[in-house]
Amino acid sequence: MKPLVSVILLIAASLLPAFALPDVKDAKRILFLGDSITYDGNYVTDVEAWLLSSGAAAEVINLGLPSETAADLTSVEQEESHIKPYGFPRPTVSERLQRVLEKTRPDWVFACYGMNDGSSLPHNEEGLTRFSTAVEKLKAAVDNAGVKRFIMLTPPIHDAGPGKPQSQHDAMLARFSQWLLSKRRDGWEVIDVHGPMRAALEERRKAEPDYRFAGDGVHPNREGHRLIAKQIIAYFSSSQAANESFEQSSHLGAGFRKLIAQRVTVIRDAWLTETKHARPGIAAGLPLDQAETKVREISALLQEQAVQPFPGTKSQWNGFERYDFPVGEDKLCSVITPANPLPGKSWAWKGEFLDAFPKTEIELLKRGVYIVYLSAPNLLGAPEAVRHWNHAYAELTRRYGLAKRPALIGLSRGGLYCYNWAIANPDKVACIYGDAPVMDIKSWPGGKGKGKGSPNDWELARKVYGLKDETEALAFKGNPTDNLKSLAEARVPLFHVYGDADDVVPWEENTGIVAERYKQLGGSIELMGKPGVGHHPHGLNDPSPVVEWILKNLQAANRSP
């Protein structure tokens, strides 16, 4: 089966806020091995949705196989533990491992074994030795296949039931887990599932004495699988990220997750059939080419459901529908919708003063462009403002389907917001239109050059940028004028309109410096001066030149590859 990355990323990329996963993003194909718990697919589905929503371009293949053991069992052990009750011997991962690795060619492998070994092997030192030897062979085979990362999960718990002592089975699983965790000293990657699951069960039973993660003691319920997934997610990011990934995906409902699970199942069954196995009773999957077609059909349905309508308070803004709703850390976001949106949901993000001099924004709306404003006042584009913008961007693009690269409109102090966010995210910007923009806090609000300055705002600027005194503020190198290189390297086009008599944000200290430095860096910038005009009025009487320039750059930046 060809990698389905391009299809899958269209869907899950609209799910959740992104998390930093620079290493995971390098993986192209991730394989999950294990027994019936992995085969069930619940925790794999959760992990896949999170990976993709985090921007990891990886195809996930679940090849868990019910009844499978890591260790090879003797005929007597097979007879007693499985043939008598079920009529067939347990499959072992060694029987199919080489075929699986050769055909799937994964970058990463996750493996979760122990549940079946714990019930079949002797409950003593011999059983531990045989399990550990089998897992070492498994890791060696995976490493020899050129897999970049091999990650073991400790086995889930065996629950004997409320009020009952620990079973011998679970005691063995605990020993398996202790041994696996000890291998971290040898450089193994091991994610602990057993310990957190036992702790969570004991805590839950304080309030619900009869609660069980697994009705049969073995196969975890939905909560059990969520717990497994959270341990994996937390291993690569944080516990907070693991919790947020579930909490913030809940708005999509069970139907969305059901489609993801269907896709996981189609891929699983197709690959199990393709790689062959020794376990009877497993439904045959589709041929790989047919499975790929089916996955694309499911992915199209996912994409339709992923994009949510704008929530919040609905009102009118200059004749267009406006929606106000919280994003990120409860900052109010305003989205104004065009009557006839352009394909791809192009948008322009105004840095400050949504209602001020709106001719450009109104004309963009008429041409099908969404207008967005995030209320984060009194931050003057400082790092805290950039963080809030990051949250908003993630939700607007992933949850509501706005295009990946907006145009930025920096009016006056809004220039600090637009430029500082763009400098931190140059690959997410189509273009920047600066309207008498502030580009250096020393010029405004500092008033350390030709401008009037604003003493109260200068004090605010020192506070939000963490500058302890005047000397440190004057030496500050975190202004847009100081950090244009990333924008030039990303070839972000700039367009500045300014008044040449501006004594509030003098153009020479702001736009003029940016223009000179940006050209030296190889960047493209267009300038339009207004003779004899001060800081006000902003914009152009006829905004057509700016609007046409923005539309051209939005189309170029968001063109499908």
Image: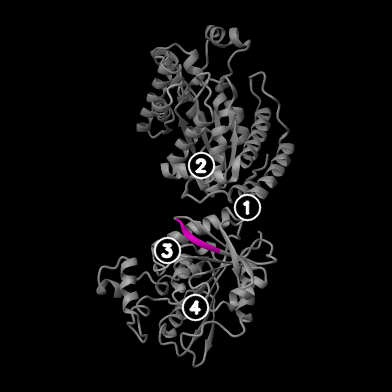
Magenta residue span: 330-334
Circle 1 crowding by C-alpha within 10 Å: few under 14, some 14–19, many from 20: some
Per the image, the residue denoted by label 1 is 307
**Residue 36 location, x and y as percent?**
57, 24
Say what secondary structure mark 1 lies in. Answer: loop
Quadrant where the C terminus sits is: bottom right
Q: CA distance from mark 3 to mark 1?
A: 26 Å
Q: Which of the 4 image quadrants contains residue 130? A: top left
**Residue 39 location, x and y as percent?**
59, 28
Q: Which comes sooner in the sequence, label 2 or label 3?
A: 2
Say what secondary structure mark 4 lies in. Answer: helix
Asked whether the beta carbons under mark 4 and mark 3 sit within 8 Å of each other, the answer is: no
Per the image, the residue denoted by label 3 is 385
Query: Left or right: 392 with respect to 198?
Result: right
Q: Amino acid at mark 3?
A: Ala
Q: CA distance from mark 2 to mark 3?
A: 26 Å
Per the image, the residue denoted by label 4 is 519
Q: CA distance from mark 4 to mark 1?
A: 39 Å
Of residues 505 and 114, the one nearer the viewer is 505
Q: Which of the 4 image quadrants contains residue 507? A: bottom left
The rendered magenta stretch, by its main secondary structure, is classed as: strand
Q: Is residue 456 above or below residue 335?
A: below
Q: Which comes sooner in the sequence, label 3 or label 1?
A: 1
Single out the mark in the foreground, 4 or 1.
1
Residue at left offset 43%, top offset 77%:
438
Q: Amino acid at mark 1?
A: Val
User: Magenta span has 252?
Assistant: no
Asked whether the beta carbons under mark 3 and mark 1 sit within 8 Å of each other, the answer is: no
